Image (cartoon, grey):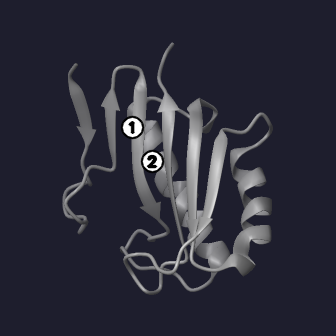
Amino acid sequence: MPIHHFPPPPGVKAPPLSFAAHVGDLLFISGIPGFDENRELPDGFEAQFSFVVKNIKRVLDEAGATFRDLVKVNVLLTRAADVAVMNRLYAEAFGPAPYPARTTCVVQALPDPKMLIEIEGVASLKA
């Protein structure tokens, strides 16, 4: 089965990965951090969450998908204190219900010490 990869845009510094891989009817979205357009991490959880959503939307748009096509999402947080705020922001960004299946984990650290959140997901591209 052929795999279509969505590499980082030219000039974007990124680790060796594709932002997403399209296999069959599924789009697997890599962990997306809250980097802004300059590849900087803004201060504050809400700002980083906002950029995570924008960055996921870009990947979905490129694949011809929307947030409604997401079937599974994994949220990684570095602070348990951010769970309540994340739930509120998540409902605004991914709503209205029904929401994709979701796992939320609080982890000790993410690749950049300033990174507070990362979201990965799977979308169905079946027409």
- Viewer-proximal residue among 11 and 49: 49
Q: Residue furthest top?
A: 127
Residue with the mark numbered 1: 62
- Check disc 1 and give the amino acid type: Glu
| Label drawn at residue 12 | none
Residue 4: % across, % down: 24, 31
Q: Is residue 91 left or right of residue 45?
A: right
| In the rendered image, the vertical position of residue 17 relative to residue 110, given as above or below | above
Q: Residue at position x 34%, y 20% from top? A: 24
Q: Quadrant of the N terminus?
A: top left
- Check disc 2 and give the amino acid type: Arg
Q: Residue at position x 41%, y 20% from top? A: 25
What is the secondary structure assignment of the residue under circle 1? helix
Q: Residues within 10 Å of mark 1 (few under 14, many from 20)?
A: few
What is the secondary structure assignment of the residue under circle 2? helix
| In the rendered image, the vertical position of residue 78 relative to residue 92, given as above or below | below
Q: Residue at position x 76%, y 60% from top? A: 87
Q: Where is residue 46, by image quadrant?
A: bottom right
Tag count: 2
Q: Residue at position x 25%, y 66% from top? A: 14
Residue 7: % across, % down: 24, 48
Residue with the mark numbered 2: 58
Contact between labelled residues 1 and 2, with CB atoms less than 8 Å apart: yes
Residue 10: % across, % down: 19, 56
Residue 8: % across, % down: 26, 54
- Viewer-proximal residue among 99 and 94: 99
Q: Residues within 10 Å of mark 2 (few under 14, many from 20)?
A: some
Q: Is residue 26 left or right of residue 46?
A: left
Q: CA distance from mark 2 to mark 1?
A: 6 Å
Q: Where is residue 99, by image quadrant?
A: top right
